[in-house]
Amino acid sequence: MSLMGLLFLTSDELKELTDLKISKAQMRWLDKHHYPYEISASGSPKVLRAFLIARLQNHNKANPQSEPNFDAIR
């Protein structure tokens, strides 16, 4: 894997993350889900691999409870 492949998601990984093939559609998905990215000279989004890993790690650590625990304030 190249150095760029270590830093950024590959185009295949970006397709897998977004389930989209077209760059503009991928960028809309990334915007909607608050993923930071840069746009390459060819117009495709570049997402840092480290951001995705950190985000998924934080997501997995988050409390899976979807509503506040109102019993805690009683």
Image: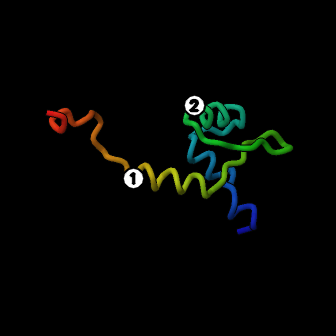
Mark sitting on residue 60: 1
The residue singled out by tag 2 in the image is: 32
Q: Amino acid at mark 1?
A: Asn
Q: Earlier in the sequence, mark 2 or mark 1?
A: 2
- The image quadrant of residue 32 is top right
Above-or-below relation of 5 to 35: below
Estimate the x, y position of residue 72 in percent, counting from the top left.
18, 39
Q: Nearer the viewer, residue 66 or 74?
A: 74
Estimate the x, y position of residue 43 in percent, counting from the top left.
80, 39
Label 2–label 1 contact, CB within 8 A: no
- The image quadrant of residue 65 is top left
Above-or-below relation of 44 to 74: below
Mark sitting on residue 69: none
| Furthest-front residue in this view | 74
**Crowdedness of circle 2 by 10 Å Cα count: few (<14), some, many (20+)?**
few
Q: Secondary structure at mark 1?
A: helix
- The image quadrant of residue 4 is bottom right
Q: Secondary structure at mark 2?
A: helix
For image coordinates 59% across by 53% down, the residue present is 51
